[in-house]
Image (tube, rainbow, N blue to C red):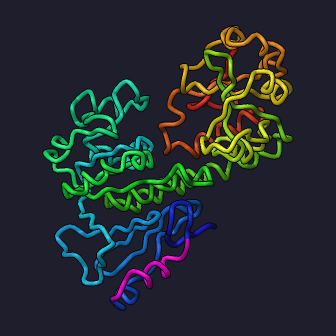
Amino acid sequence: MICICGCTGRGEVRGNSEIISENSTNDSIASNSYGHMNLQYATQFDVEYFEGGYALICIADDKFILIPEGADEPNWMSEDMVAIRQPAQDLYVAASSALDLFDSIGELDRVTMTSTKYSDWSLESVTEALDNGDMEYVGKYSAPDYEYILSGDCNLAIESTMIYHSPEVKEQLELLGIPVMVERSSYESHPLGRMEWIKLYGLLCGCEDNANEIFDSKVSEVESAMGLVNNANNTNVAFFYITNNGYAVVRRPGDYISQMIEMAGGTYVIKDANDDSNSSTMNMQIEAFYDCAASADILIYNSTIDGGINSIDELVSKSQVLADFDAVKGGNVWCTGSNVFQKSGGAADMLVELIYIISGTADEHSLEYFYRVE
């Protein structure tokens, strides 16, 4: 179990007791604390519980005090802590990965504003909310409609780390009196760490027990499927798509997709990054991709950018070189569904399906996130 208790700079974590000792001049903060949220995989946030129903949420350098409905700010609250008052509702969520987690705990109706356009959503529940007016598109994250957000009685904005490219937006929202939480689930090193953010959103919505039950249930499903990993025999797997100009775009080694492949018993065929970029993907000349992946046992095509493929012929039409790949000749080509990257709550299910694919048992199961390409 990995249980991290607080954060300092982005990417650095340390014990929450250190944060408290540096930022609080009131000794009562320690005496009022009675424990931390139990986190198995997530390392990018911490929650400490306090008497009276208060909670201290630490995400990187940011600290939030969750204040129960009708309660006053605690006397031990310091100036660097931002108040979030329950109930959390009329939320503006610019971090698309968070919406599926709200949906997973049955609390999507708390989110009334988004910065992702209707055409860019693959989550049916979100498009339905946009269709019936329960949720509104309020402009791109870097240029939101402040007047609409303010008139919507928003009491919390949840941003992705993209907001650091437009810091003036965060500042303006805060000037309007709206707390801004920057979620960092994409920085989680463990694939299930991303999904464990469901516990934080459960806390915000007042349904933490439900969120814990959902998470624990999914982890149990992964543990049950892990018995099939021994059947994988270090199967070589490539995960990619082909651009219009003929490049293969692959996930970097160590990226959460490549980690999931390794956890599922596969061997990810891309071993070395060819530059110092922080991007989760990299472009490869098709010749270099051939050298890495031609003998791979399984090819998984990423449908996110170009909508995917429906046949082997369609795949080969993107690059004739692919016809010589072992997985193409052997009929072991798979494609992701369009919802893979927006359904952050499906990380456990996705991992289970990868176990089925890599262990050779996928045809015995109904899959949601992948399909075989004939």
Instruction: Say left or right for 362 vs 203.
Output: right
**Which residue is painted at 66% across and 28% down in the image?**
249
Instruction: Say left or right for 205 vs 7.
Output: left
The prevailing secondary structure element of the residues shown in magenta is: helix
Task: Say if 82 sits above or below 35 in the image.
Answer: above
**Which residue is painted at 55% across and 52% down in the image?**
187
Percent position of residue 270, x then y:
77, 37
Magenta span: 14-25
**Which residue is painted at 81% across and 40% down in the image?**
232
Q: Does the magenta portion include 20?
A: yes
- Residue found at the far left of this picture: 151
* Residue 120 visible in the snapshot: yes
Corner quadrant of residue 239: top right
Percent position of residue 320, x then y:
76, 10
Q: Does the magenta portion include 322?
A: no
Q: Which of 107 and 329 is in front in this view?
A: 329
In which quadrant of the rendered image does the C terminus lie? top right
Q: Which of 224 and 300 is in front in this view?
A: 300
Percent position of residue 208, x then y:
39, 62
Corner quadrant of residue 120: top left
Percent position of residue 257, x then y:
65, 41
Instruction: Say left or right for 53 vs 228.
Output: left
* Residue 364 visible in the snapshot: no
**Which residue is painted at 24% across and 63% down in the image?**
86
In which quadrant of the rendered image does the N terminus lie? bottom right
